[in-house]
Every structure is written in C-alpha cells, then in structure tokens.
Amino acid sequence: MLQPYAPMLILIAFVIANAILMLGASHLLSTYRRTPTKIAPYESGMPVLGDARERFSVKFYLVAMLFIIFDIETVFMIPWAVAFRQMGEMAGLLIIEMLVFILILAVGYVYIWKRGALQWD
C-alpha cells in the first residue's frame, strides 16, 4: 500500500537526516570564540545610533507592499511573453489579456499616486 510512496518517504527521511547531521557536525566541529569584534553589531562600519526596535512609519510598510505588488507584475509578464511567442492564432487574445492586466495595475498605480502613498515626508 505504501509502495508508491516509498521513494518520496526515503527522500524526506534522507533530507531530515542530512539536515540533522549537518547541524550537529557544525556544532561539534566549530571553534567559536567570542571576541569584541565578533559580538559588535555590524552596520556598514558605523556605530549604532538608536534602538533597533524603534517604530517605523506606516508609509514605510505601504511602500514596501507596493513594491512587492508591482514586482509581482513583472513575474507574471515573463511567462506571458514566453506564451505569446509560442501562440500563433491566439496572439490577439493574449495581447488583450495583457492590456487588461496592465490597465488594472495602472488604475491601482494612479489611485495610490493620487492618495499620496508615494509622497515621502
């Protein structure tokens, strides 16, 4: 009954055993010495100015989410371009599909632009 799943189970067992073995070996074989240079925070060679847990403006997170959204647009355009080259008769439909997609994204971009989400104070 489990015979079809045997290769997958063996692979999962091997991956888990390999991860445990690598973590254990690195822990046992490492020579870690705490020096002042190693425990100092590294931030481009500059001393730390302030607390690392200070609050960020909501605008920071909004711009980050907008970047992710518009970056995903590019991820969807690359497979579309590959499919467009391979489709002969349906090329017109694919162009219309991509124009609708870009139009929806453009409306969203204009909306966030008008709402002032891209203005950095």
Image (cartoon, grey):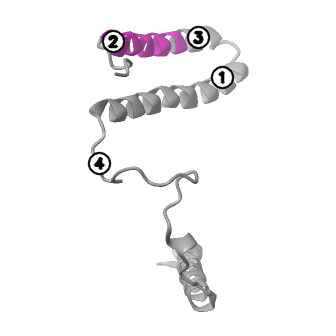
Q: Which amino acid does label 2 sit on?
A: Tyr
Q: Tell me the kind of residue under disc 1.
A: Ala
Residue type at the position of mark 3: Ile
Query: Of the residues tagged 4 and 3, which is closer to the observer?
Result: 4
Please determine whether, in this image, residue 87 is positioned above or below residue 60: above
- Label 3 vs label 2: CA separation? 24 Å
Q: What stretch is highlighted in magenta?
A: 98-114
Residue matched to label 4 = 54
Q: In this view, does 75 lie to the left or right of 120?
A: right
Q: In which quarter of the image is residue 22?
A: bottom right
**Which residue type does callout 4 highlight?**
Glu
**Spatial separation of the CA atoms under disc 3 and disc 1:** 10 Å
Asked if residue 112 is among those painted magenta in the image, a careful observer would answer yes
Rounded to the nearest angstrom, the CA distance separating label 2 from label 1 is: 27 Å
* Residue at figure coordinates x 51%, y 14% from the top left: 97
In space, the residues marked 4 and 1 are separated at their CA atoms by 43 Å
Judged from the image, the secondary structure of the residue bearing numbered disc 4 is loop
In this view, the mark in front (4 or 1): 4
Nearer mark to the viewer, of 2 and 1: 2
Q: How many discs mark residues in the rendered view?
A: 4
Q: Which of marks 3 and 2 is in front?
A: 2
Please state the horizontal and vertical placement of residue 65, each as a whole percent of the image: 38, 33
Which residue carries the number 1 mark?
81
| Residue ID for mark 2 | 111
Q: Which residue is label 3 attached to?
A: 95
66 is higher (above) or lower (below) than 53 = above
